[in-house]
Image: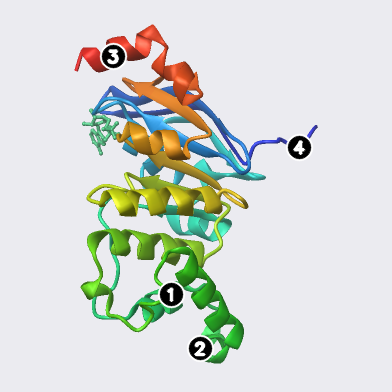
Amino acid sequence: EEPSHFILTVEGLTVSFDGFKAVDGLNLYIAPNECRVIIGPNGAGKTTVLDLICGRTKATGGSVRFRDMELLKMREDQIVHAGVGRKFQTPSVYEDLTVFENLEISYPKGHGVFGALAFRRDAAVRDRIRDIAEQIFLDDSLEKKAGLLSHGQKQWLEIGMLLIQDPQLLMLDEPVAGMSVAERRKTAELLNRIIQDRSVIVIEHDMSFVEDIATRVTVLHQGKLLSEGSLAHVKADPRVAEVYLGH
Ligand code: ADP
């Protein structure tokens, strides 16, 4: 069998809540270096799809293959370990710790007490923290308490806390919610850099931001795929217009 070109292959993904199909037979094929944006009206099933992929919600049917692993058979922590990072809508950083410490605490640790001691002294870890801090525009704020950052900077820090774990797939739920225009622009820059060596799935409502980041767009409606392709393609799809006008 030919190895799949896709980093993530979702087929027939389904979940029912008391007989209601929130996600209904969804197929999704994510390529390496892709930024896939999922759009759709409220209640379309966007968040549930990410919850199913990261193991937070158990699927009723289908399969989710990530590299050579079946994620539907794995626990949430195993999925993180396998290289899938998930960021939720509200930033959750350790407010009383500095930016440096937030990144340090997120660095994958070796097992046992010696691993934990060794990692703290490791110059390579410090270099990695500085490298990530630069990517997330916080290299001047390493010693600042995370609680003192702007809302947008906290969102970046949380992305940094995922990046330091070196995930091959990153899933972000409305990453620019509450950000200024300037912060949105920098977030687009950050995502465009991230997909140089990873894939990203983003749930997003802001169409100008979608235009800046998406390699492909998937439109969900009532748990099913409604339309897929470039942003221009899905925008021109009459079924998409119908769904958005209906809401
Ligand atoms: P979106 O992110 O596109 O707004 P969601 O994935 O949050 O949509 O929700 C899709 C549908 O599934 C909604 O009707 C929501 O009420 C329902 N739903 C989501 N999670 C649960 C759950 N744990 N139990 C019952 N219904 C749920």
Given the image, on which type of amino acid does mark 2 rest?
Answer: Arg
Q: Marks 4/1: CA distance?
A: 39 Å
Q: Which mark is residue 243?
A: 3
Disc 4 + disc 3, Cβ < 8 Å: no
- Find disc 4 in the rendering and name its residue: 3
Disc 4 + disc 1, Cβ < 8 Å: no
Q: Residue 246 placed where, x, y %? A: 21, 12
Give the residue displayed 54% in from the left and 84% down from the top: 112
Sequence-first tag of 4 and 1: 4
- Find disc 2 in the rendering and name its residue: 120
Q: Marks 2/3: CA distance?
A: 52 Å
Given the image, on which type of amino acid does mark 1 rest?
Answer: Asp
Up-down relation of residue 76 to residue 215 (above or below): below
Tell me if mark 1 has few (under 14), some (14-19) or many (20+) residues whose alpha carbon lies within 10 angstroms of its own.
some
Q: Is residue 215 left or right of residue 54?
A: right
Q: Which mark is residue 139?
A: 1
